[in-house]
Amino acid sequence: MKSSIKMLTRRRVLKGMLAGSAVTVGLPILDCMLNENGTAFADTGAPIPTRFMAYFWPLGFGEQDWVPKGAGSDYELPWQMAALQPFKKRMNLFSGSQVFLDGAGNQTHFTGVQGFMTGKVTTGDEYYNSADALIANTIGGRNRFRTVVCAYDADPTASWTAFASGKQLAEVSPGALYTRIFGPEFTDPNAATFVPDPETMVRRSVLSVVGDERARIDKRIGAADRRKLDYYFTALRSMEQKLDIELQKPAPLPACTKPDEAKDDGHALFLASDSMTRLDLFLSLITHAFACDQTRVANTVCNPQSPALRREGDPTTHHGYTHEEPIDQKLGYQVKCAWFQQLYFQHLYNFAAALDTVKEGDGNLLDHMILWAYTDHGAPRLHSVRNYPFITIGNGNGRIKTGMHLPTPGDATTRMTLTVQQAMGVPVSSWGTGSNHVTSPIAGVLA
Amino acid sequence: MKARYCGGVAGIAATASALAALMSLPSSVTAQTAATAADTELATSLRLTPSQYRQTIADIFDKSIKIDGRFEAEQRDQGLLAMGARTQNIGDSGLQSYDDIARVVASQVVDAQHRGTLIGCAPGSPSSRDDACARSFFARVGPALFRRPLEQDEVQAQVEAAGTAADRLHDFYSGIRLALTEMLISPEFLFRFKSMEPDPAHRGQERMNAYDKASELSYFLWNSTPDEQLLQAAKSGQLYTQAGLTQQVNRMLGSRRVADGIRALFSDMLGFSGFEAVSKDPSFFPRYTPTIKDEAQEQTLRTIVDHIVNRHGDYRDLFTTPHTFLTGHLATLYDVPLVDTTDNGQPQRWIAYTYPAGDPRAGILSEASFTTLWSPSGRTSPTVRGKALRQSILCEKVPPPPGNVSFKFVEDTSNPQFKTTRERLTAHRTEPMCAGCHKLTDPLGLALENFDSAGEYRTAENGVSIDASGELNGHQFDGPLGLAQAVHDDPAATGCVEQRAFEFETGYAPPLNDARWQAIQQKFAATHYDVLELLRAIALSDLSYSPPEPKVLAAASH
């Protein structure tokens, strides 16, 4: 079989990009182009990759009561996220920033995330090139899966991940995700022998027939449809690339183990406890997928208005309570909403703790990633786009400093997403449009 | 060391296109230079929807071919999945889903159970290539999959792919399987195109390619791929003539398969894809089961098909008709007597049922499909039901809530002052900031408050009698029957189904001021709102086969 696999070097990348094209393309910083930080697998010497994980929790916290008084390292974790106390020195809490609407309406549960994820606030439902997708384009292109997006409430449209082609809809079934990643096409990097699958070799070859159809189709369609097909053929190349990867002997990864097979088929849910069980299943699969270098970017999401976010015996959803529950005059917050908030953070803690047990090189998986938690609203009772809480856990292979509360009252949330993009090596120096345009990361975070 | 790691694991060709693939950007210079035209032109190609995919595979191969696997979720655009089929691209995850399903389908086509009938010939040796047998298979299946005749070199490419694979894997059927998988993820199969070509009969004008026209008709009226007669009509040029087009449209509308098209149209219009995420807490609604969820949709679709296809009924009467179909499960949910002689252990039958006079149920809005789909899992939401009715039945837009709205006036459900949903929402609607939109939605939804979140009838909530009075565009009424009559009488209802039918066919909105569109509307009205006649008028109109107006582009695209 004729091999299309070539060694990827900086010279070859630049030459390939510039050959015969005046197209300006941002240069992704591949690990092979970065200076190493001395973090490498002891047995192979290969640098340990940096991963990015986005963890969505619905409906924020409260209005102002969650914002710590202190800044820098001198602060106390608010009670809503008390579960994260063991990670306080290895995390950051960001408060105070907002999405500027610039005259557009606030489409609740959408506009805020649209603003900081894509940098643009629009009156319609435009949603392309989210920050996590841009990170995936930068660091995820060499893996079987550029990114993994999972919805733990059975709603595939809850995804906040979007490429130039549009939203990547979420996987809703842990069972299907297991099969996709760890099914028959998974190659154990630690296996003693490696024999390329003959069928995969043939599939790779047969796919070229599809690629050859392009010219014939282009002759009979207009420019807009040709652009649509550009996305299709880009996806086809990704599929070819995935097969190429499966035909290569993977480097050994001592931390890689196959998870237990997930049985959950993604059926509809109606209780928060069930949703969290499914979330845990997804997070476990993602942890193994990171450790086995099947993907380097993931995002777990749910629809904030999901009927699945309810307590047993209670007909009202978390979302319903954000609207209807009065603030307890003595406690100063919505008590029933707080139950949900603490639940989401307990599971975030469980995830971080699990990552912390996966040894890689001299550290562990949590050290080699940025786990970024984000939400759809500042004050959920008001469904506002002000005073957003964001959290990072892990230092991303030493790329960010940790242990801080970073209040940026009145600043744009896009500075948060610019910061994580730069931390993950996305070649972007400014981010956002209109009042959400920023040109520098949050001060004092990047190492 | 770094270069080895990078090259070894990356395994990609470092070309500009590969790098673009890496970044998920359009790769070619063509795409960049064509951006201006692409920005001002409306894409007209449509992805095959999961529903169309299933029907197509069943028609080309066999109903016994199971479509196991999960399609990438469809996106609803301006109220219809059919509109989303035009605007939704196929990215990495989408193509992966199609590939997963294609492999499952192709495996079944060549398995021991099906190969004898579906391949149509036996190879000289099952362990090696047999180009003649492969060619006969692809020459037969190819046109059905791509919905046009295949060029010789296209058939040869498949034969060669299958032969090479058979040689390498030492299995003829594996070769067919892999080449068929490739055809099933081809853009020629996954997209329906609307290609225009010079019209020799009208110099300087364009016409839609006959094969693409055949596809559009077939998926519109049958929700599936064109049959041989329709492809033959395209080949002979018959579809280019009004007489030939009429002959084919009449044939298709006279076929029982039109029920498939009607089902697909109304499943989409009524938002039934949303049922995937519907669940009801059994501690509150023990009668609501997954079976009920499926049967509720089937009840409405049966009611619609019966009304439109069998009775040639007035579309407006769908909202008031007492005629429907029930199973024992649904009869229990609805608390109506149903005589069912089905033996124990057998699947429950569908039995025609007519609601007696005075029954609170009549028409499709009172059925569990509508009342349960548009309710949260624990309790009803008149706002959600009212919004759904405005958007999916009347094609009206309900604006999103204003930014940073205060909800301080909405009280807790346990507040003794507000026992019913109406009381809680009244507090909401008196707030000026919210009143504008809630006055549009709530009075419609409140009229359905007699149906709880699981579709069961009730007369009280928390011990207080339900007030199910409502209002639609100034027309006051009481209860679900009053609402049904108000929707029946509202001209927006017929306007909406006209619009949805056209959008379902083309993937874009009709030009409302175009005389051809107005002619379609007039024909629908003149036939007492017979939906089959609406479909006929649309299918016979030149408007359906013309490029969309640029004005529509501005409104329809992001």
Image (tube, coloured by chain):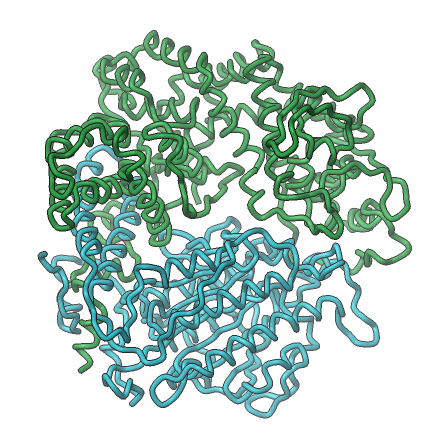
Chain colours: A cyan, B green
Above or below residue A172? Residue B133 is: above
Name the residue at 51% across, 83% down: A91
| Left or right: B55 in relation to B418 | left
Q: Position of residue B249 (x, y in %)?
A: 40, 14
Give A344 or B326, whichever is nearer the viewer.
Answer: B326
**Figure quadrant of residue B471:** top right
Q: Of A11 and B113, which appears nearest the observer?
A: B113
Residue extending furthest front?
A: B344
Residue reaching furthest bottom? A74
Quarter of the C terminus of chain B within the rendering? top left
Is A351 or B117 nearer to us in this picture? B117
Q: Seen in the image, is B423 located left or right of residue B100?
A: right
Rendering coords of residue B422 (x, y %):
82, 44
Whether residue A410 is visible: no
The x, y position of residue B302, in whole percent, is 59, 25
Residue A35 sits in quarter: bottom left
